[in-house]
Image (spheres, helix red, strand yellow):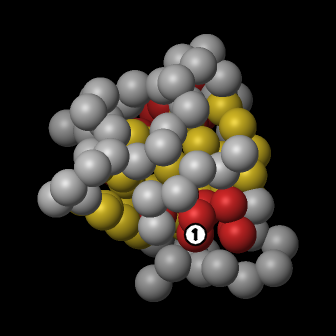
Amino acid sequence: MLDFTAGTQVYLACGVTDLRKSFNGLTAIVKLRFKLDPYSKSMFVFCNRNRTLIKILQWDGSGLWLFMKRLDKGNFRWPMDASEVKQISIKELRWLLDGLTIE
């Protein structure tokens, strides 16, 4: 279950991510590319090239969760600057998951 409680940090992996990756591959991106701790009270959000699929990696204290949402029509309004990780609020994540822009 996604943890939307206060204090949860949300990080977007801007740009394109190969979403054939699962737990290990996405955890490696968080650690090596963004220098963040995947086992912190955070959500790490990734999007595919077509912007139709999002994966969210989250640690719950005893294990990793991997959530996925796929759109059948349209695409997510995803920031495309591949060199950056962007911290957003829980409210902005909900907007993004509903197909709205975070701007």
Q: Quadrant of residue 86?
A: top right
**Is 83 left or right of 50, judged from the image as shown?**
right
Please name the residue shown 45% across and 84% down the image. Answer: 1
Give 89 or 103, whichever is nearer the viewer.
103
Please name the residue shown 52% across and 24% down the image. Answer: 80
Residue 88, image x and y in percent? Answer: 73, 52
Q: Quadrant of residue 94?
A: bottom right
**Is 16 left or right of 61, judged from the image as shown?**
left
Badge 1, how many Cα within 10 Å: few under 14, some, many 20+? few
Please name the residue shown 20% across and 55% down the image. Answer: 73
Residue 63, image x and y in percent? Answer: 46, 71
What residue is disc 1 on?
Answer: 94
Residue 40, image x and y in percent? Answer: 70, 59
Reply above or below: 4 against 54. Answer: below
Kind of residue at badge 1: Arg
**Is 8 left or right of 27, judged from the image as shown?**
right
Give 58 or 15, whichever is nearer the viewer.
15
Q: In which quarter of the image is residue 36?
A: top right
Q: Is residue 61 visible to the viewer in this orientation of the structure?
A: yes
- Classify the position of the C terminus by image quarter: top right
Reply above or below: 5 against 38. Answer: below
Reply above or below: 18 against 4. Answer: above
